[in-house]
Amino acid sequence: MSNEVNYEIIESGGKPIKAWLRGVSLDLMAKEQLINLSHLPFVLPHVAVMPDAHAGKGSTIGSVIPTVNAIIPAAVGVDLGCGMMAVKTSLRADHLPDDMRPIRDAIERAVPVGSAGWNQMKGDHPAKKPVEDAWSNLQPGWLQILEKHPAVDNGHVNHHKHIGTLGTGNHFIEVCLDESGCVWVMLHSGSRGVGNRIGTYFIDLARKDMKKHLINLPDEDLAYFTEGAEYFTEYLHAVEWAQQFAFVNRTTMMDQVAIALRKLGSLPEFTLTELVINCHHNYVARETHFGQQVWLTRKGAVRAQLGDWGIIPGSMGVGSYIVRGKGNPESFNSCSHGAGRLMSRTQAQKEISVEQHARDTAGVECRKDSGIVDESPAAYKPLDAVMAAQADLVEIVHKLRPLVCVKG
């Protein structure tokens, strides 16, 4: 690895903030959040900022946060275990039809999109049995969570109704081509409603805990649990379960997409190759860095240890990268999880027209209506600039060009 320092230091008066931001912007709210974070006594030895960073709830999305004997639930977030999955297939570009709409329709029939999950599916859907099997394996962990925290299930949690479902926002399923004409299937989703409920519940408990112990924070969303204190272990168990749920959710969706494509009848027989990547980018894990054990929160960041496979998606119409980690210790072996938002959803809805969205997604079979402009390419940072800023964190192996993009 080169000895060149590719990050810049954001002055904070607290712990160092090392930011991979060359050629990309950082909004003022995100900077303020990073500075607040750097003043927490248990954040050690520094905070790492990825080039896709932008303001989040309490903590900046696109940040890597090492903590000693404490975890900040709002930094881990509510889309627990959200991440990416990509599979290379044996299909090639010349196997695909000119009109990709039937492929998009088949995926949308196979995988529920939006917030309703399996509640919107009528009759005997072929995915229901795999979903039930997946839930039977996950259910014991859910019951253990409820044994100590029955209020987590507030009567609205869909849990098994959301396994194998996509959700809304920036979650997506894509059919892509790499530079050699090989077809890939890629998707982005997390722990859905049940992860959101777990995250929200424990964030609220952490806030109450701070008030109980009269701990003042620069932002209430930096409320934390200390190791060995009430709720710490229970929170950690619940988060680990939600991360497992997210992993299973992605695997179940990928299986259903493959089945749907095979049933089309217009594609030749194909296989899913051994190159399968399934990685989180919203999670916490116990790791050792600079000789010290820490709880490492990757809030919108991917683990990029030396040789790790990763996925860095762009926005609709832009493309994505399959990468391998370079194991940069300064970033805590991490890289960005995507391009990162340039505009808030509200701003994008005001500034991006349907006509601009259609131009920017030309050649991609996807939604072209006003309900999706907040996910349009113009709402995101330029992906190539983001990749250039982290050239010392990852090696690019493949660039994927989207042909079909399904969103909720």
Image: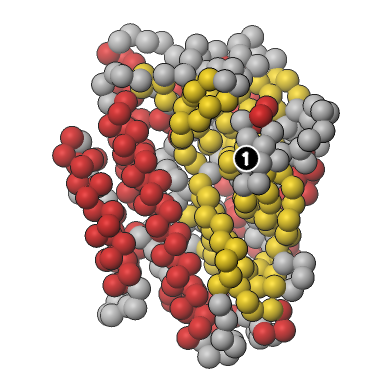
Q: Answer yes or no: is residue 390 visible.
A: yes
Residue 74, given in percent of the width and then of the height, sits at 43, 31
Residue 73 in the image: above or below residue 179: above
Q: At x 28% / y 80%, what residue is drawn?
A: 124
State the residue at coordinates (25%, 46%): 141
Residue 127: quarter of image: bottom left
> How far across and down, in percent of the image, does residue 24 sit?
76, 37
Report the residue that reaches farthest toward the bottom: 265
Residue visible at 52% across and 80% down in the picture: 261
For residue 27, what is the image quadrant? top right
Determine whether the residue tagged by mark 1 lies in a helix, strand or loop.
loop
Measured from the top left, where is residue 241 in percent x and y? 33, 44
Circle 1 Cα neighbour tier, 10 Å, few/some/many (<14 / 14–19 / ≥20): many
Q: Is residue 184 left or right of residue 160?
A: right
Would you identify the image quadrant in which residue 135 lies? Answer: bottom left
The answer to whether residue 114 is seen in the rendering is no
Closer to us: 8 or 86: 86
Q: What residue does disc 1 label? A: 305
The image position of residue 101, as x and y in percent, is: 59, 80
Q: How many marks?
A: 1
Q: Amino acid at mark 1?
A: Gln
- Frontmost residue, 324 versus 118: 324
Q: Answer with left or right where residue 83 lies relative to residue 182.
A: left
> Which quarter of the rendering shows the N terminus?
top right
The colour style of the image is secondary structure
Tell me which residue sits at (83%, 28%) in the image: 4
